[in-house]
Structure formats: C-alpha cells, structure tokens
Image: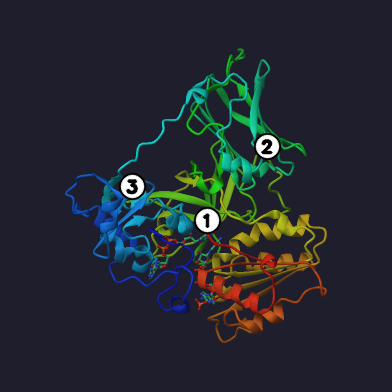
Amino acid sequence: MLNVPSQSFPAPSSQQRVASGGRSKVPLKQGRSLMDWIRLTKSGKDLTGLKGRLIEVTEEELKKHSKKDDCWICIRGFVYNVSPYMEYHPGGEDELMRAAGSDGTDLFDQVHRWVNYESMLKECLVGRMAVKPAIPKDYHEEKKVLNGMLPKSQVTDALAKEGPSSPSYDWFQTDSLVTIVIYTKQKDITLDSVIVDHQDDSFRAETIIKDYSYLIDIELSHEIQEDFSVRIVENVGKIEIVLKKKENTSWKCLGHPLENHNSLIPKKDAGLYYRQCQLISKEDVTHDTRLFCFMLPPSTYLQVPIGQHVYLKLTITDTEIVKPYTPISDSLLSEFKEPVLPNNKYIYFLIKIYPAGLFTPELDHLQIGDFVFISNPEGNFKISQFQELEDLFLLAAGTGFTPMVKILNYALTNIPSLRKVKLMFFNKTEDDIIWRSQLEKLAFKDKRFDVEFVLSAPISEWNGKQGHISPALLSEFLKRSSDKSKVLICICGPMPFTEQGIKLLHDLNFSKDEMHSFTA
Ligand code: FAD
Ligand code: NAP
C-alpha cells in the first residue's frame, strides 16, 4: 500500500490510465514521483510534526489521527505519519486512507508486503505502539547448544492442525564432511524447495513445504569450505546438505541456534532474505529491454521455481528500493536445464528500462562486477497445474512475457500429454517484441508450438493482428484440441490488461482452475 505497486506503470497517453478496478496506479501530479518523495525526505523537513521526537502511541491516540491532513498508520508495531506522503503514493490517497488511524499491517501485507516501507517512510516515523504486557517466553530449549539431537520445533498449535506435519532435522559427520538432513515428511519435495546461504559463520537453510517455510539458522561451531552440495532423497522427503569441513576435526556440536532456528511458519509471514549477486553481463534484447545475468554468491544454493519471481534491491539516494522481477532461462531454444542442474549459479532477467522510472535506470547504470541484492523467490504458480495438461495458452503483454519463458521451456520438454502450446503476444510495435526470432524458430522446430503477435500501434505495413485483448481475438485463439481437453491459460502483463483478460476468460466460460494470472 505504501510504495510503488509495480504491476502497472502506464505511459501518460496509454489507455491503461483510464482502466479502472484492481489496484492500478493513479496518475500523480507533476513533482510527485517517488524520486521527488525521496528528495523531500532528504530535505531535512520535519515530516512528522514532532521535531525529531519519537513517542509511544496508544491505540486511542492512533485512532485520533484518521484525517487526510493528519493521518497516522501502524505497520508491524511502528506508527507513521503518512499525511506528507499522500500525494506521492502511487496507489492513490484513498488507498492509503483505508488504514488511517489504525493498524494497516494486514492491508499492507495483502497488497505488497515486500515493499521496504521502513526505508521509504523513515522520516515519517512517529514512534512505536505502546506495548501491552506479554507473558515471557521460555527460550531455554532454543538456547541449548545443538548436538545433533532434535530440539522441539517452534510449531504453533494452529499450524500443527492446518499446516504440513512438523519437519525436523538431524546431522552427522565423517572426517571431512558434515551432513545436515532435513526430514520434510513431504514426498513431493523438489530441489527448488530448498534455499541455502552460508555467510561468515552463519548457515541458513529455508525449505518451502507447501505454503510454509521451515528454517534452519545456525552459527556453525567450525569453519567450512565455500562449496557444498544439496540433494533430495527421492520419495521420502529427505533433503541432505553436505558441507565440507575446513579442518578434519571432530565436531562436538553443529553450532548455536540463531533467531527463528527450527521454526515452521506460514511462508507469507517469513521475511524476505537477500544475498548480494554480481552483474556478469548485460545485453540489449530490444531498444529498451536488456538481458541481465547475475551470479549468485558461491555459498548460496538457490533455484527459482517456474512461474515465481524474486525481488531486486538497490539503494537509490540512500533509500532502499525493491522491485519484483521474474527470472528466465537464458534462451528459448536451449534444452530445458532447470531445475535439474544443481550447480546453477546464474540468474537471468529480461528487464525493460523506463527512462522516467525509479529503479530501472539505476539498474541500467550498473557496471559489470557491480552488485544487487536478490531475494528468495515468491509466487503462487504450481508446477502441478501442468499435470495431464493437453492445451496450454499463454497471453502475454510486453515484459509480461517473462514468466512464459520458463513455462514454455518446461512444458515443451516435460509434459508428455501436451498437444498444443499457443502464445498470443501483445506489444505496441514490432520493435517492442522480445525474442521474436527465437519464438519463430521455436514454432518452426516444435510443431506443437504456435505464436501470434498482436500490435496496438503498428506501422501501416503490418499485416498481422492489431489492437488490444478482446473477446474476438480470444475466442478465435483459445480453441481446445478436443472438446474435453485439459486446458491451462496463463496471463501476464500490465495489471489492467491482466484483469481485463481474466474477465474475458470468465465470459468465455473458462473456469478458475483453467487460468493462472501472474501478479506480485
Ligand atoms: P516506475 O518508477 O515504476 O515507473 C515506470 C513508468 O511509469 C515510468 O515511465 C514512470 O514515469 C511511470 N509512472 C509510474 N507511476 C506513475 C504514476 N503514478 N503516474 C504516472 N506515471 C507513472 N519488469 C520487467 O522488466 N521484467 C520482469 O521480469 C518483471 N517482472 C515482474 C514481476 C512481477 C511479479 C511484477 C509485479 C512486476 C514485474 N516487472 C517486471 C515490473 C517491475 O517490477 C517494475 O515495475 C518495472 O521495472 C518498473 O520499475 P521502475 O521503478 O523503473 O519504474
Ligand atoms: P507495454 O509495452 O506498455 O504494453 C504491452 C501491450 O499491452 C501494448 O500493446 C499495450 O497497448 C497493451 N496494454 C497495455 N495496457 C492495456 C490494457 N489496459 N488493456 C489492454 N491492453 C493493454 O507493457 P510493458 O511496459 O512491457 O509492461 C509490462 C507489464 O507487465 C508491467 O506492468 C509489469 O509490471 C508487468 N509484469 C508483471 C509480471 C508479473 O506479475 N509476474 C511479470 C512481468 C511483467 P497500448 O499501446 O495501448 O499501451
């Protein structure tokens, strides 16, 4: 709610500006861009009206500040005076007012919990909510030195009822190796379910089990080498992380638990973890889109699941800015490599540079060798949606093509039941089409695949399809290979495009299970 809802950023003349519904951006007044906001926060102006004091805010006090020109909002226990920010909020003032004088945490999480409001709003901080006395928690169990025994997991009663059965871990050693074993108790666990980071002494392994996150977070008792391996013991839900000791000594314990070690919490409540990644290469793909390749640190193991995105973080004028991007494979024509290649150290992005944008010009200015922070993956696309699939239809507009890249590669290589894959790709002009020749070559190489380009602002010589997403275009395009064929339609693009597409698909009698829309 409090930062850029990056799903849509229509050009001032675009019809996206007049599209309604959802949480599209509202046009901002001249001089009210996020960059202008950042400048204001650096100007030294007193934005809280408290002359630099931080106060304790009671619920009664918070409720009193519920007007546009005096609007306080609480997020995760911290209270902000957002009145000065109103005109800069890309989602509009009304959206912000929904949380006026109250705890806006849930609303914020629903819309974009990844946004680093702490940084964006630090000059608006009024203080903390007055804390109600809480029953102290007995940390005795957690503070125990880990010696390979299984400490009690921090699983709440509610979780035990709704979530996956509680995972656990163990460890064993040889002279040269230490193996950490995670028992997920989930048969269908895959290599992209686990993310491992080792920085200094701290060792962190996050395992995604259904919609939950199981965390191992330990300060290791001894030094280890940079490289380690991760493997899955098929069908029993066991993950093994094999670490190489720096010295061949016997370890008495694995290490000391860090905060949230051995906890299982809903994924939506787990914070985003970032690591620094180095820019390796940058190539032009179209006049305004570039292919960026970043290298993960040697001591990170991370594979982004198909259909998921990550967040990139840069510090712009002393303010941390975060935006979502969808990793792709480096080409459409290579055989499908992920997620089977365990040592995949590179992560590719196709990113459009908006000259008047906040984040992308900064990204574009990075030199080879520079670093950005990249988060753990997020997203709700499930590979199980491909099961027994016969017809796959992809509707993409502009960079909304990015999730389709891995989907195309995976589906054409791994789904034996698949008969037909069709992509309808909406762009303004021919020059805007990403990977046109690769798409045409793929259609030539694989008879199941077909691509149609639709242009909204073509030159008069264009003899392909024209216009915007419409009932006529869709009903002609979405022809099943047989009456009862199993269908999946994936849609991604500017938010109003996606919303309109979903509405049209409903009108064409496709069910919810037959569509997937990509959003943040
Ligand atoms: P912004 O500052 O957001 O501005 C973009 C343009 O819109 C500029 O021209 C700006 O002047 C204009 N603008 C912005 N807000 C307003 C307003 N309120 N009124 C008037 N004009 C406005 N993009 C990719 O290129 N590749 C990807 O793989 C990708 N993946 C994504 C995945 C997800 C889940 C989501 C939600 C988005 C993804 N995006 C992707 C979009 C990306 O997150 C950013 O939104 C995009 O890069 C623009 O960022 P920016 O800060 O440079 O531009
Ligand atoms: P763009 O070039 O502005 O637009 C691409 C095409 O879509 C153009 O033909 C455009 O027509 C059309 N279009 C735009 N708005 C429309 C609407 N309301 N109804 C019908 N057609 C519409 O696109 P872009 O700049 O690349 O932006 C791509 C968008 O995809 C961004 O908003 C980005 O956030 C989003 N994205 C989301 C994800 C995700 O959620 N996972 C991933 C990647 C990208 P006009 O000529 O009329 O504008």
In the displayed structure, 393 sits above or below 39; it is below
- Report the residue that reaches farthest toward the left: 51
Q: Is residue 179 visible?
A: no
Where does residue 46 sit, x and y in percent of width and height?
Answer: 19, 53
Q: Give the CA distance from mark 1 to mark 2.
A: 29 Å
Name the residue carrying label 1.
325
Q: Earlier in the sequence, mark 2 or mark 3?
A: 3
Comparing 473 with 276, the one in front is: 473
Q: How many marks?
A: 3
Q: Earlier in the sequence, mark 3 or mark 1?
A: 3
Q: Secondary structure at mark 3?
A: strand
Amino acid under disc 1: Tyr
Q: Secondary structure at mark 2?
A: loop
Q: Which mark is residue 78?
A: 3
Q: Quadrant of residue 285?
A: bottom right
Q: Nearer the viewer, mark 3 or mark 1?
A: 3
Amino acid under disc 3: Phe
Q: Is residue 164 visible?
A: yes
In the displayed structure, does residue 144 sit left or right of residue 44? right
Name the residue carrying label 2.
184
> Measuring 40% from the left and 50% from the top, which residue is drawn there?
116
In the displayed structure, 199 sits above or below 37; it is above
Q: Nearer the viewer, mark 1 or mark 2?
A: 2
> Measuring 56% from the left and 49% from the top, which residue is drawn there?
377
Q: Quadrant of residue 251?
A: top right
Decide if ligand 1 comes within 8 Å of the CB at mark 2: no
Where does residue 263 sit, x and y in percent of width and height?
Answer: 55, 35
Q: Quadrant of residue 345?
A: top right
Decide if ligand 1 comes within 8 Å of the CB at mark 1: yes
Where does residue 74 sit, x and y in percent of width and height?
Answer: 34, 52
